[in-house]
Image (tube, grey):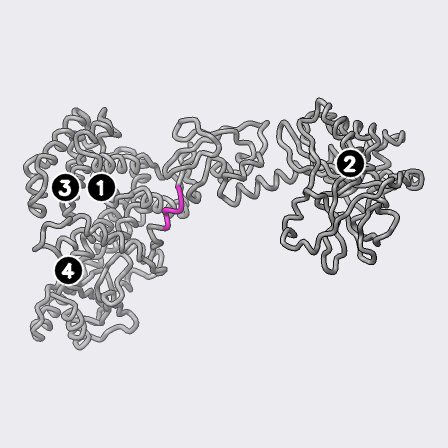
Amino acid sequence: MIRQFELIDMVKAYDPDLDEMLLNRAYVFSMKAHGMQKRASGDPYFSHPLEVAGILTGMQLDCDTIVTALLHDTIEDTVATYEQIEELFGLEIAKMVDGVTKLSELEYTSETSKQAENFRKFLLAMSNDIRVLLVKLADRLHNMRTLHYIKKPEKRARISRETLDIYAPLAERIGMQELMNELEDLAFPHVYPEAHESIMKRLDYLYSNTENVRDEVIRELEKIFADNFLDAEVVGRRKQPYSIWKKITFRNVSLENQADLFAFRVIVDDVAECYKALGVIHNTWQAVPGLLKDYISMPKPNGYQSIHTVVIGPQRKRIEVQIRSTEMDIIAEKGVAAHWRYKNESSKKDNVHYRWLQDLLEILEHAADPEEFLEHTKIAMYQNQVFCFTPKGELINLPAGSTVVDFAYAVHTNVGDTCVGGKVNGEPAQLNRILANGDQVEILRSKAQIPHQNWADFVVTGKAKAAIRRYTRQQKKKEHITQGEEILKLSFEQEERDYTKKAITAVAKKLNLKGGSATVFEKVGSGELSDRAVLEIVFPSLKNKQDTISTSAIVVDKSRPHKAGDNQLPIKGLTSGLDVHISKCCHPIPGDRIVGIVAEGKGIMVHTIDCEALEVYTDTPEDWLDLSWQYPENKSSIHIARVNITLKHVSGALASVLLLIAKDQGNVTNVKFIERSIDIFRIELDLEVRDAKHLTDVITALQASKYINSIERAYT
Ligand code: MN
């Protein structure tokens, strides 16, 4: 176990200005907090955070990160609290410890690669501070190093699978090759025991026959560099079993063909010498065409730089050589943190850790190489997404701003349709609660629930929007059908005719409507078809009898304009020869104060004096005509007025309104439903009346109705 003073020395070696007191406090705090806890190995638990801290000193991380490593399991596994840590170590460290705790609480369960990709993105998004991710990776590395102490093979396999799917790719992504290799090779035997065994056997055999080749290659390389006055260090390393296995599996290469049982590495001082070394090698041995890769001029997204070439070496065996500078070598093995240290060894002060963090973030942000095994999408991209969990731990990926309802619909349309509330991290939450990264969301459902139209105001996912729209449409249709039938029944009653559904089915047939009587009801309910028209189809004799209130008189303003001077429109002050239209916006009726507007090509539009549509003409008084109604008016003259009514949403309400209107000799020609909610609905009625006084009588009668909340004449 690393002793307290040893840890201090390890950090001091690269950061002489460290806060020794802080580090000591963290060491003691963590040791006390973990107390008598034991690891599976039988070691005191405290050895684990200590080793994690040790791994991070190897990456030369700043003091705060080392402290975070020491404390990383205290919130989760001991009685220590976030508040305590904040008080003792400050907000920044407390936040980082909290971040690591949150990452540890996430359990990666799914087997699909889609989930793995989501999970990696999620970890990145959660690690607001990249140091949180580094502590998590070091934590995982130490757990993998001690994995063999865990007794259950299934548990070892699960942890190892997670390491291969999630943590090794993340390590590669942030340019920590060495860490990635170690994680992979530790996990390999637990996830693919048979493959591991056979590969290791085969490698043993191959290596026993090739070790002499390796030594020969190294000697030859050293000789040719010396001949060319090039100062180079040459290493020949065995390649990682897992990376060999990956190549065999994913690229279908047989083991015998592997040029890269060994990776030969040539390390020189600078970039110019890299290319010089390449020239020397190619002059000595024949290069295999197409296998030269220049990652110096085109670095990998994670910052990796090197020249790779494959040549036919001694004993006519293919060998792979990687050429790089010392600086590139450090980046490749230890990642950007170490690189930054290397570059700035002389100038210690000046926010060391923030500078390298910036480098790392830049690499992550500019990564874009589809060839890579990993998705190298911008880290910023994940800021537009949130990753939440079902109670079973399944990961749901949603756009930022998503709510409980979006989550419910993402799980399943039925879940969305019937959700009544939710629990976010165990706490009750409203349906419009905006979800945050890492939230665990449980949806509360009720069979009686239906999607509400107002959900559309806060949901953000297309799926939720579409489902709500679809449902509202269906619902509207249902209501139109019920109300349409109600209107028709009443209309029949008014004419003292027997109402039968059969008659309505016949109407549907006659009008060529699919869906039978229901379609007729729907159209009447929505106002597309008037009840009067239906009545007249069933009883054609009504057409003549009701001539005074006939539908043909209603169409006044629809298709047939009136000629000025026509008897039908009792209006004084018209210019003869022009068409006259009763405007549809305000439906003026006798008794209203009216004006005419002369519109080019359209004739005269008649408006009420307070119609809003007149506002546009205030600057052109020459277009105004002073009009008035002609008295005494023609008794049979019928006019249309429009009223807005807010009704209580109870059965029979609409019927009672229509009856009241009928009593006052008004006739409803059109009903349009504007809005519905649980307790009210708003309708727009077009009424046939004789004049303004008649309309006022009707409105007064309606105001007395217990079903009506409000009624007013509509001018627009
Ligand atoms: Mn841990």
**Along the polypeptide, which appears first: circle 4 or circle 3?**
3
Q: What separation in Å lies between label 2 and label 1 (alpha carbons)?
A: 81 Å
Q: Which residue range is magenta in the image?
A: 381-386
Quadrant of res 466: top right
**Along the polypeptide, which appears first: circle 1 or circle 3?**
3
Q: What separation in Å lies between label 4 and label 1 (alpha carbons)?
A: 24 Å
Quadrant of res 359: bottom left
**Along the polypeptide, which appears first: circle 2 or circle 4?**
4
Could you say which disc has been placed on residue 135 in the image? 1
Q: Say above or below: 675 vs 617.
A: above
Mark nearer the viewer, 2 or 3: 2
SS at mark 1 in the image: helix
**Along the polypeptide, which appears first: circle 2 or circle 1?**
1
SS at mark 3 in the image: helix
Would residue 479 be visible to someone looking at this image? Answer: no
Mark nearer the viewer, 2 or 1: 2
Are the residues tagged 2 and 1 within 8 Å (C-beta)?
no
Could you say which disc has been placed on residue 63 in the image? 3
Residue on which the image places disc 2:
692
Residue on which the image places disc 4:
327
SS at mark 4 in the image: helix
